[in-house]
Every structure is written in C-alpha cells, then in structure tokens.
Image (cartoon, helix red, strand yellow):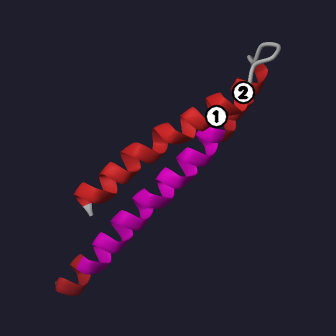
Amino acid sequence: MFVALIYFNFIYYTTGFFAFVIFAFIASVLFRTLANKFAKEGDRPDLYYMIFIGSFVLPTLIHMLFFI
C-alpha cells in the first residue's frame, strides 16, 4: 500500500505539473498574439508579454515554497 501511495502521488503531481506547463505555453502563445495584434504605434508588446510571464512566476514560486 505504501508503494501504491508513492506511485499515486508521483502520477498526481507530475500530471498536474505537465498540465500547468501546457496551459502556460498555450496561454503565452495566445497572449503574445493578442499583444502584437492590439499594439499601437510606438508601443512595446513585449512589455505586456513580460508582465504576463511575471504573473505566472510569482504564484508558482509561492506554491513551490508552501506546498511542496
């Protein structure tokens, strides 16, 4: 039973991690497309993109510190 518990936790956490990575990749591609599409003349859409990536980094670090 102990081995089954370790195996379940491994599958559970790795599945969640890969789901998050796939979600972040799809969301970043979508956000980059939208930022480039709606950028005005003289605007820097990469700043919007960096803000989006930063909004993923801080919650991820907090989650890693408190829940792992």
Observer-nearest of 33 and 22: 33
Q: Does residue 60 sit above or below 27 in this rendering?
A: below
Is residue 61 left or right of 66 when viewed as pictured? Answer: right
Q: How many marks?
A: 2
Q: Which residue is mark 2?
A: 45
Q: CA distance from mark 1 to mark 2?
A: 6 Å
As drawn, is 63 to the left or to the right of 51? left
Quarter placement of the C terminus:
bottom left
Which range of residues does the magenta coloring cover?
6-28
Residue sticking out furthest to the front: 42
Give the amino acid type for the residue marked by disc 2 in the picture: Pro
**Residue beneath label 1, please?**
49
At which x and y percent is residue 51? 56, 33
Residue drawn at point x = 41 percent, y = 57 percent: 16
| Secondary element at image label 1 | helix
Crowd class of label 1 (few under 14; some 14 to 19; many from 20; radius 10 Å):
some
Instruction: Give the residue at x 31% y 78%.
Output: 7
Quadrant for the N terminus, please: bottom left
As shown in the figure, which amino acid type bears the numbered disc 1?
A: Tyr
Quadrant in which residue 28 is drawn: top right
Secondary structure predominantly adopted by residues drawn in magenta: helix
Q: Is residue 56 magenta?
A: no
Q: Position of residue 31 (x, y in %)?
A: 64, 31
Q: Which residue sits furthest left?
A: 1
Q: Secondary structure at mark 2?
A: helix
Asked whether the residues under the numbered discs 1 and 2 touch, taking CB atoms below 8 Å apart as contact, a structural biologist would say yes
The residue located at (77%, 21%) in the rendering is: 37
**Is residue 27 a member of the stretch shown in magenta?**
yes
**Residue 26 located left or right of residue 55:** right
Residue 61 at x, y percent in the picture: 37, 52
